Image (cartoon, helix red, strand yellow):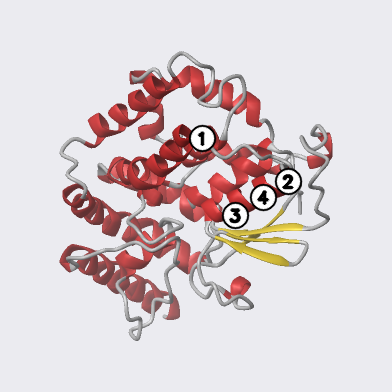
Amino acid sequence: MRRVKGLASLNRAARAIASDATSSTQHRLPHAAPFTTFSSSTSQSFAQKIADRFGKSSPSVAGAVAGFSVAASSLGQDVHAKEPPRSQNFLPKDVVLYQYEACPFCNKVKAFLDYHRIPYKVVEVNPINKKEIKWSDYKKVPILTVDGEQMVDSSDIIDKLFQRIHPDNSAPESDEEKEWRRWVDNHLVHVLSPNIYRTTSEALESFDYITTHGNFSFTERLVAKYAGATAMYFVSKKLKKKHNITDPRASLYEAAETWVDALKGRQYLGGSEPNLADLAVFGVLRPIRHLQSGRDMVEHTRIGEWYSRMETSVGDSSRIPE
């Protein structure tokens, strides 16, 4: 009897979530602010929370919902098998990343850490109660602690780490590098969400990854996969309108081609080696690479060769196995 009642409750919750997503008119997605409980006292719709759960690391709508990377499969590899850190100037003893596995901006930070071969631990934050980050006044992800020091916001984290790796670097970041890092946060992320949730099947594919890799209970996983996919399918339509996207795939292909054009025949934007803009683009795209949208992007644009070079250059994950 309890099981029957439980399934009935899940069914009502799923219908309510889809209804909230359809009726909601404004969805501003702050940086990776996760969803709360499924109780009737929740002040925001589950659709909003789903969107926030995979939002941007600064206040804007992030195609961030896009963070569903099968490319993170290397995370379980032993960090001791990797080469030494690229720089001996920065050798922290304890680096911990508080994250959502599916968050693209967490993946952006991980791409930087992996590239510089900095070993790090991962704490997967439960999106419902966020108990893992209750110690912090900052209630979004990513949060990175470096020997006890807290760093927040993906771009700020990367800037601070870069300065510590290159303390004697007197050359300022080039205007080109700055421009394309801004392009990642202000444009590229916005075309991802409408692509990931373009169809019901693609929405389910995305949430299948989320619920498999995220820190969910069985009930949360069940509701999130079906109700969340339904909600975000409708939310993505509103995002298309907000960002003037008429054809999601065309916008994704255009963004990929724009990036390839920016390379101007170079191996990387940074020349012979990736710079921060290369790592930002790679980090944000890595979550979608093996979803349908990512497969289509590689098949129909010229970005595949650059992406493969980046995979080789970034190498295996530096995550310390649990």
Q: What separation in Å lies between label 3 and label 4 (alpha carbons)?
A: 6 Å
Q: Quadrant of residue 189?
A: top left
Q: Identify which amino acid the numbered label 1 is placed on.
A: Ser
User: Decide: marks 3, 4 in contact (CB < 8 A)?
Assistant: yes
SS at badge 2: loop
Q: Depth check: give the residue in front, 90 or 119.
A: 90
- Which residue is located at x 43 percent, y 74 percent? 36
Quarter holding the N terminus is bottom left
Say which residue label 3 marks.
157
| Above or below, comparing residue 18 to residue 122 in the picture | below
| Above or below, comparing residue 45 to residue 78 in the picture | below
Q: What separation in Å lies between label 3 and label 1 (alpha carbons)?
A: 19 Å
Q: Quadrant of residue 132?
A: bottom right
- Which residue is located at x 42 percent, y 22 percent? 303
Say which residue label 2 marks.
167
Q: Identify which amino acid the numbered label 2 is placed on.
A: Pro
Which numbered disc, 2 or 4, marks the residue closer to the eye? 2
Query: What is the tally of numbered marks visible in this picture?
Result: 4
